[in-house]
Each structure stands twice: as structure tokens, then as C-alpha cells.
Amino acid sequence: MLKKPFVTKEQLEAICEQYPTPFHLYDEAGIRQTARNLYKAFSWNKGFKEYFAVKATPNPTILKILHEEGCGTDCSSLTELMMSEKCGIVGDEIMFSSNDTPAEEFIKAKELGAIINLDDITHIDFLKETAGIPERICCRFNPGGVFELGTDIMDNPGDAKYGMTRPQLTEAYKRLKDLGAKEFGLHAFLASNTVSNEYYPELARILFEVAVEIKEETGVELSFINLSGGVGIPYTPDKEPNNIFVIGEGVRKAFEEVLVPAGLGDVKIFTELGRFMLAPNGHLVTRAIHEKHTHKEYIGVDACAANLMRPAIYGAYHHITVMGKEDAPCDHKYDVTGSLCENSDKFAVDRMLPEVEMGDLLVIHDAGAHGFSMGYNYNGRLRSSEILLKEDGSAKMIRRAETPEDYFATLEGFWE
Ligand SMILES: *Cc1c(COP(=O)(O)O)cnc(C)c1O
């Protein structure tokens, strides 16, 4: 599918007069539309709720926009819980899906009334001793092995640190019931960034069958099933995006076939999507500041891997549009680089692009999730600002760029 920026060159140049590059730009209209489509796709399920994975885009303005569209938060750390609380998103609008959890985080989650999702059977006693067992509780499942769709291996749960084994799950529900828990959920995250309409329906069927077994084995009737994240987006233009309506319908079919006949037709479906909600609704905007002609052709930009780490660590493809040259032929082969003293700091390698001139604006696509949030300060590079393109077309800074003062702030005695 053709990748088109959600802004025009003229719009972007106007924004750049106000806010210097590099910055992350988010599309409010696109975020709202994505959330509305998700809710529509699952409107057949009473009690459906999306808990946005805060780690994907931890910005309060974004969380509040999503909250207005009905979404809660999926938190997994103290600061994510604090951010959610500050946004007024508390109680059962928080799913606390953490692992290797410190005691203070269970205490904070319990205080906020969050739904605690236990990653391990040993966490039952840990939670009991630190915060106490809440009435509402969730368990995370890991079936092991590999997760397949048809003949494709999608991911490798057997190698993943998360979740409980199937026998542990039965024990966990029995024990939680003995300890006074009254409302139960089940959660699993078995494959990441799936570009397939089959992932959620297949995962749902697995979890629904487990729910039926749990009811038979322990008498516990689950009240919600959390399909977690993992619905992906096509980073490369040759792939078709997922169709959330087909996905919602696939989950409904499994629901009707497995849960309804077992008397579990009241189960609520939850999701914890991050990438699907935000990635396409965010651009990293950067400017070409150097060209270099050596053994290869290089374009140096003013952003670097500290602003978007995925290409450097996963070799991930992110599509690039040279603004104003959308229709020009892609007849130049470039490496598009940042300034880190790391050769992996390349947004693109051997990428065919229109001829890039100094000062051109480049949009790096699909940076709205796991983009800014994975940023770091290597080489003393600073995190960029985050800008919201509002529905009325105006731009608003929702996080300022870091300054050298921020970078030095944690050093003892630096300014003395
Ligand atoms: C990262 C994560 C998510 C979101 O994953 P996406 O791939 O962004 O959809 C959801 N739930 C948990 C527990 C996670 O760790």
C-alpha cells in the first residue's frame, strides 16, 4: 500500500517555523479514527475495552485523547502507573501487565485499583505479602512451543520469559479463589507485530478453550479475556494492513463457537494494543543537513537512532518520504544516517529515494509507537520534542525537547 504522510509539505514547513526539527508528530484525527474503528469492530462484545499499551507512546496528551475514545491504559511500571493516574485514568481502567515486578509497583497498582495481571504463579504469594490479593485479578498464560498460523511460525512463546504454564494456570486460579479473589481474567501475548487478520482470532480460540477447561477444573468462571497486543502494521509498502473489522469478526466467531455453548457468553474482551493504535499515526520529522559521497552515497539528517531506535536494533524498515518530492522518481540510492558514533545509526540502507537536497524535510513513517519511547541518550544526544497535529490542522507541542540541562540534571555536583 502506498504510504502517504498525513501532512503536506506546506503544512510541515509551517510547523517547522514554530518548532525546529527533529520532532515526533502525531495525528489526532488518525488516532481517534483508529480507536473508533477498533470499538466498532468489537461492538458485538458487551464490555469490550482497549487498554492502550502506555510503553508504546507515553505522553499524557495521547493517553487523554485515547481515554476520550473509551480506552484505558496498560501499564507495566511505576512511572506508567503515575502517568495514568495523573491523566485521571484509574481503577479498572488500568490493566497492570508487568513482569519481574518490584513490590512498590504492586502496592501502587493495588492502591489505584488497577486490574493486576500476574505474570507468574509465585507472584500470588508475593502480591499477598506486599499489597494483598485484590478481588479482581488476571493471570498471564504462556502455552510454550511455537505459535503458528497455518504453516507460518509467527513467534516463539516457548522462548519467552512471560506467563504461566497451563498446569500453573489451573493452580493459580484455585489458589486465588481460596485467597478471596472474586473476579478473574486470562491474558496472553503470543506473537508480536502480526500483519495477519488471523492472529487475534487464533489467539482468542486458544484462550477461550482454556477458559472452558478452567471452568470445568476449578469452577472459576472468567469474566474477561485480554488478547493483549501484537496486532501489527505493515512497515513496508508492499504489505496490506490488517483489517480490524475482519479481525473483530474472527474473534466473534470463536466466541460464538467456544464460549457461548459453555455458558460463558458474558465474557468481556479486552485488548492492549500499542503499535496498531499509534504507529501509523506518528511521523519522525527530520531535515537533511549533510550529503556525503564516499564508498556510498549518504544523506545525514538531524535525527538519529536516539530518536527512533528500531532500525538500529532490529534492522527495521521505516518508509521515508522526501517532502515535496512524493511524485519524483526514486532514482537515487542512499544510506540515510544519524550522527551517533555507531555505524548502525542508519534510518535506511541502500534506499531508493528521489534526489535529496540539503534542507529537504524527510518524514520517517510509522514512528508513532515504540519510537520516541525507546529513545535514549547515547553520545549525549537529546530526546526530541513531540508535536500534536490537532484535528483543526493546528500544531501543539505536547513535550518539549530535552536540553543539555536535562541531560546533566542527575549528576551530583556538575554545576558547582
Ligand atoms: C508491549 C506490550 C503490549 C503492546 O504491544 P504492541 O505490539 O505495541 O501492540 C501489550 N501488552 C503487553 C503486556 C506488552 O508488553
Image (spheres, helix red, strand yellow):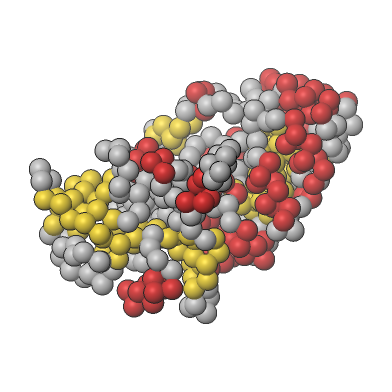
Q: Is residue 113 above or below residue 155?
A: below
Q: Position of residue 95 (x, y in %)?
A: 70, 45
Identify the residue shown where x is 67% and y is 66%: 68
Q: Up-down: is 267 above or below 324?
A: above
Q: Position of residue 92 (x, y in %)?
A: 77, 49
Tell how many labels: 0
Q: Is residue 210 visible?
A: no
Residue at the spot x=30%, y=47% of the render?
339
Horizontally, residue 307 falls left or right of residue 34, namely left
Q: Residue furthest front?
A: 416
The residue that appears at 30% across and 39% down in the rendered structure is 341
Front one among 355 and 182: 355
Image spot of residue 338 (x, y percent) = 30, 49
Question: Considering the image in quadrants, where does the C terminus appear?
Answer: top right
* Quadrant position of residue 166: top right
Question: Left or right: 274 with respect to 81?
Answer: left
The answer to whether residue 338 shows anywhere in this view is yes
Q: Nearer the viewer, residue 164 or 152?
A: 164
Residue under the point 59% across and 61% down: 62
Q: Nearer the viewer, residue 325 or 39?
A: 325
| Along the line of sight, the residue nearer the viewer: 241 or 60 | 60
Q: Is residue 310 above or below residue 52?
A: above
Quarter that holds the N terminus: bottom left
Q: How far across and down, in percent of the image, does residue 318 sit?
A: 34, 51
Question: Could you say which quadrant of the image residue 311 lies in?
Answer: top left
